[in-house]
Image (cartoon, grey):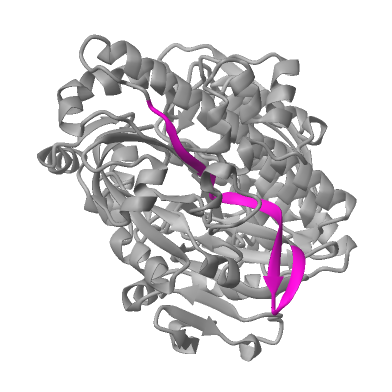
Amino acid sequence: MVSIRDLVRVDEHVYEVPVGFREDMRVPARLYADEYILEQAEGDRSLEQLVNVATLPGVVGRALAMPDMHQGYGFPIGGVAATALPDGMISPGGVGYDINCGVRLLSSAIEAEALRPHLPRLLAAIDARVGTGVGASGSVRLKEAELREVLEDGAEWAIRRGYGVREDLAHTEEGGRLTAAEADAVSARAQERGRNQLGTLGAGNHFLEIDEVTEIYDEATAQAFGLVRGRACVWIHCGSRGLGHQVCTDAVRVMQQATAKYGIRVPDRELAGVPFESPEGQQYFRAMSAAANYAWANRQVIAHLVRETFAEVLAGRIANTHLPMVYDVCHNIAKVENHEVDGRAMRVCVHRKGATRAFGPGRPELSEAFRHTGHPVLIPGDMGTGSYVLVGTEAAMAETFGSSCHGAGRVMSRSAARRAVRADQLRAELESQRIVIQAGSRAGLVEEAPQAYKDLDRVVNVVHEAGIARRVARTRPMGVIKG
Amino acid sequence: MAPFREIDHTADLALHVTAETLAGLLIDAARGMFSLLGCEAPEGAPEVAREVTLDAPDAETLLVDWLGEILYLHEAHGECYTAFDIHALTPHHLEGTVRGRSGADSRRGIKAVTYSYLAVTKTAAGYEATVTFDV
């Protein structure tokens, strides 16, 4: 069993389990951390999971964990690993059940203080319009043929249907569409689950937040991103809903048998996978891409509904209610990318499981809007602390397959949070910070209490100091909708 | 010992389940899952019954498939199940009926049943398993 005492310090915020630590490791396992985060790593099995990732067939470079690392399924949350194509493995455990769970940020020209008096009405109106909570169904009901279009065209479908503007796509990772997607690769059951959930937030740690931009660390980049201190912005955190969960469930089931077919042995059943180019690998990749497209369409529809709500509720009260896109990132995904590994250009399948792409300036994958700066890296925090906007860096390309953290990372179990936190007390504390809460359930609220998460400032400080993403701006919540 | 109890998991939910028989383990795991869902149907809501038939290569996959199927039925039909009968069972095959009521509301959602650290183990007292749910 690995512990933090087995880590070798490579740099100020970089620690490594050497490749020889366990005989089945193919590459080192590297963790971005400080002393506080190392202590947290002892509290669950995430370090062991990171070492397990370093054993995957075809894994190259290093198995990586970002400072928000905590226990997941197969991969730790915060895990990143790349496998060399064509024969390297693809593993649904390296993506997660909520395929393309991700974050979208909208900016505004609205002064936060001018918006505050309207927050209760605005949040209630958004909550009524956007399906939130367990089992929510959305206002967009899809026929079978329409769902197929969503699966294959992603956010582009949404733009064609009038949910947003074409410019939004240039501000979305992959333009909101993975072209490998095939609707036929998605099971009938998964499609059935997706028919009525477009435009819904879901529950758990998903949220919609209206924040104030409170700090700017990089004026020029913040300006390029459309972020101005003192103005309101909107965060949307959700994924592919029941459709994505089913795609992963279907794939993990298939992989249980298929892994043996290719003579692959993995230390954890949730790491089960197959060669990328195998029929099973391609089936999963196409279905995963389709689920990712569904999630992008979902966030595009939700953003549109939020924009409509702002315009309606604030009509005659605030002059400019326009909410332009800053960016949209995914943090549960597997993508085919070109990277340099040990001095060689390589085509790899990068798995990001609770990790965010952080591409720096000059990358051809980026739209013109971000080719000069690198793209925004959106890091949502808990409802009391707020969130960060960072920017991708060239160092990330060199060291982490262009990846960064995705959030704060949990430190407290949900059951422990329910024991430690009282809903009325939590509400009162948040309200004393002038945060308006619209929550679907008391249990859902306390399980997402700020004390259940790591200190986001420290997590972000690690990635900033390590150079794999650079701080641009900080936002703090004014109003929160949780399912 | 209680047939199921919630155990701490950093990000999600997990249950430790014990029973004298494999069928009992599957039934108690289902009850435990619905306990985590916090599922309730309104008084007087229509009664429902769903048949479940599964084949699996091993007992762990059977458990995951069983819970996954019931979870799907719950979400797809908005039903809350309180009674679980297993008519035929081997570690590779299951036939059962789940009964409950429609119009269900749940306190929380479960995204999926996982294989994470899952092992169906035979003990002196019967069977035990720890099941983790992605929320």
Give A430 or B119, whichever is nearer the viewer: A430
For this rendering, which residue is in front, A56 or A458? A458
Q: Eyeballing the image, is A417 above or below A37?
A: above
Instruction: Tell me where residue A93 sits by quadrant.
Output: bottom right
Q: How many marks?
A: 0
Residue A361 highlighted magenta (yes or no): no
| Image quadrant occupied by the N terminus of chain A | bottom right
Residue A104 visible at all? yes
Q: Is A270 displayed left or right of A310 in the figure?
A: right
Residue A391 found in image quarter: bottom left
**Residue located at (34% from left, 59% from top):** A412
Residue at position x 25%, y 17% in the image: A319
Asked if residue A354 is positioned above or below residue A87 in the image, the reply reads above
**Residue B69, can we see it?**
no
Q: Residue furthest left?
A: A432
Q: Main SS of the magenta segment? A: strand
Residue A262's place in the image compared with B73, above or below, is below
- Residue at 41% across / 78% down in the picture? A13
The image shows residue A15 at horizontal and vertical percentages of: 47, 81
Q: Position of residue A379 (x, y in %)?
A: 41, 51
For the C terminus of chain A, the quadrant is: top left
Question: Residue shown at 73%/66% (left/top)?
Answer: A83
Image spot of residue A46 (x, y percent):
50, 68
Q: Does the magenta portion include A326?
A: yes
**What x and y, as percent, mark residue A34?**
36, 76
Asked if residue A316 lies left or right of residue A310, the reply is: left
| Left or right of A205, for residue A270 | right
**Which residues are the magenta region?**
A323-347
